[in-house]
Each structure stands twice: as C-alpha cells, then as structure tokens.
Amino acid sequence: MKRMSIAAVLAALALTVVAVGVFAGAGSASPRATTATTVAVAASEFKFVLSKKVVPKGAVTFVVKNKGKVPHDFKIHGKKTKTIAPGASAKLKVVFAKGKYPYLCTLPGHAAAGMKGVLTVK
C-alpha cells in the first residue's frame, strides 16, 4: 500500500472543506440580503395614495403616477421627481434609515390642499 504525504492529505482535506462550504451555501439567501422596496404612488387632486405607508429601511423606489388632471410632483427626504404631467409617471429612488419622513407635492398650493403625508421606515 502506498503512503500519502502529509501535504497531500492536508491539500485533499482543504479542498473538501472548500467544496462543502460552496455547496452548502448554494441556493440559500444570506439573512442580510435585502431587496429594494417599491412603493406605487398615485397622485391626483389633491392627494397621494401610497401602496405602502410603512417600509423597511434601505433603498425605496417610488413609482409616481399622475392620475389627476393637473401637473404634480413628489418630494421626500430631500429628493424630488420632475413635474409630472397628467397621465405620466416618474421614478424616484431614495435610501432611508429608520424614522418618519414627510412627503408632499411642491407645486404652489398643492400640499396645503392635502397633497402631503408621512412615510414610516422601520
């Protein structure tokens, strides 16, 4: 019977450990893996309707659709969409920490008429 050198045995063992580690993790998501959250926002005269008013911290993409008859925009956490024409849409990506974040339409008189609210980030 041939004897294997210690180096050969250690190399084989190291390859086995690496292979087991690679295959054990295949197909499983890391508990820290996160996906971006999408919030649909319907803008009309004179209100916003959000598909979610509570979201997890991290990246949030707002898809704002103007369902009204006059232009609107959407501002939150220092970021704002362009002015959105009736029937058009705009996307806005914002990264949040935990907290409460007010949102509003910045066009004159729109927030005062009701186009505002608060998003909660947990």
Image (spheres, grey):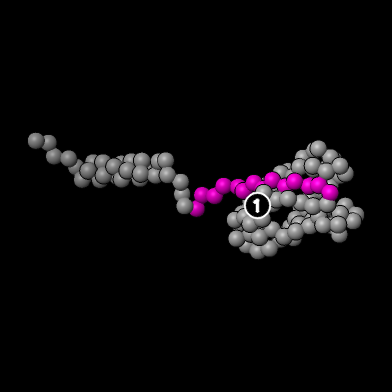
Q: Is residue 116 visible?
A: yes
Q: Which residues are magenta?
A: 32-45
x and y percentages locating residue 92 in the rendered image? 73, 47
User: Is the C terminus in the top left, top right, bottom left or bottom right quadrant?
Assistant: bottom right
Splitting the image into 4 quarters, where does residue 24 fall?
top left
Splitting the image into 4 quarters, where does residue 4 fall?
top left
Most foreground residue, 54 or 57: 54
On screen, residue 112 above or below 83: below
x and y percentages locating residue 49 in the rendered image? 73, 50
Left or right of 30 on screen, residue 52: right
Q: Is residue 83 visible?
A: no
For badge 1, the amino acid type reads Lys
Q: How many marks?
A: 1
Most foreground residue, 6 or 60: 60
Residue in view at x 64 percent, y 46 percent:
38
Residue in view at x 90 percent, y 56 percent:
109
Residue on which disc 1 sits: 52
